[in-house]
Every structure is written in structure tokens, then in C-alpha cells.
Amino acid sequence: MKTVALIIFFMLGFSNLSSAKSPPAPVIVDVRTPEEFADNHLKEAVNIDFRDQSFEAKISALSKEQSYVLYCRSGNRSGQAEKLMKSLGFKSVENLGSLQEAAKKLKKDCAVRPGC
């Protein structure tokens, strides 16, 4: 009888694990200029220009508990933005590099010109 109860306990435990909610998808942040963003960007991406004087204020208004993935033209600005965000206490930030690299890693298409 104890064996049956133990098996049921494990089965219920594992079924709860499989139905557990997956974490929310990361927010995709394009840190290029608005002009670059308008030219092409990933679907679902938000544009927060790293070169804008209010960049730090804009990212500071975001939830530090949310996950973020960043990209730019070459990976330089997104790398700098990643360092800044981590220094401000953001828990999960990742630099994906360029638009093309981000599209490949996230398996997403571009909004303006498909195929990025």
C-alpha cells in the first residue's frame, strides 16, 4: 500500500511539473536610432535609442524582474546597454548582437523586410 501511495505521489508531482507555467518571453529591445528601427526591426521589438539622452531614464522605468534581450547594428550599443542595465540592477539582460544575429537566435522575422 505504501508503494502505491508513493507512486501516486510521484506521478502527481511530475504532472504538476509538466503543467507549470513557463517564464514569460523576454522583452526584445532594439537600441538603435528611431531611423534605423523604422528601416527594419524584429517583430515585437520595442525601440529605446541608446544614443538618446533619456535612455537611462527610459530603461530605469522598466521592470528589473523582467527578462530583456537587446540588439543593435553590430552588437556594440547593445553590449553597452546590457552593461548599464545590469549595473542598474536588472536581473536578466542579454546582448544578442546585430539585428540579423538576434533574428536567428530568437527565430523571429523582421517587420519591414522579411528575412532581415
Image (cartoon, rainbow, N blue to C red):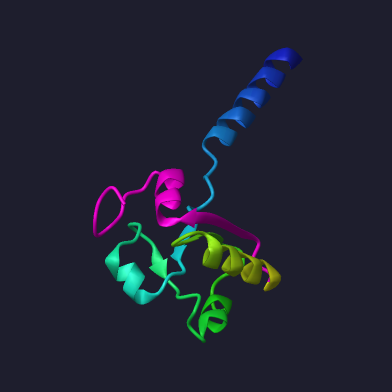
In the image, 92: left or right of 29? right
**102 vs 29: above or below:** above
- 42 falls in the magenta region: no
Could you tell me residue 111's position as x and y percent? 27, 58
- 112 falls in the magenta region: yes
Viewer-nearest residue: 95 or 77: 77
Could you tell me residue 53's position as x and y percent? 51, 86
> In which quarter of the view is residue 15 placed?
top right
Tell me the residue at 36%/48% (across/down). 108
**105 vs 82: above or below:** above
- In the rendered image, the residue lying farthest to the left is 113
The answer, for residue 112, to whether it is visible in the render is yes
The answer, for residue 1, to whether it is visible in the render is no
Viewer-nearest residue: 24 or 107: 107
In the image, 88: left or right of 21? right
- In the rendered image, the residue lying farthest to the bottom is 53
Could you tell me residue 57's position as x and y percent? 55, 83
Viewer-nearest residue: 86 or 39: 39
Tell me the residue at 61%/28% (across/down). 14
Could you tell me residue 92's position as x and y percent? 62, 58
Q: Which residues are magenta?
A: 89-116
Tell me the residue at 40%/49% (across/down). 103
> In which quarter of the view is residue 38 placed?
bottom left
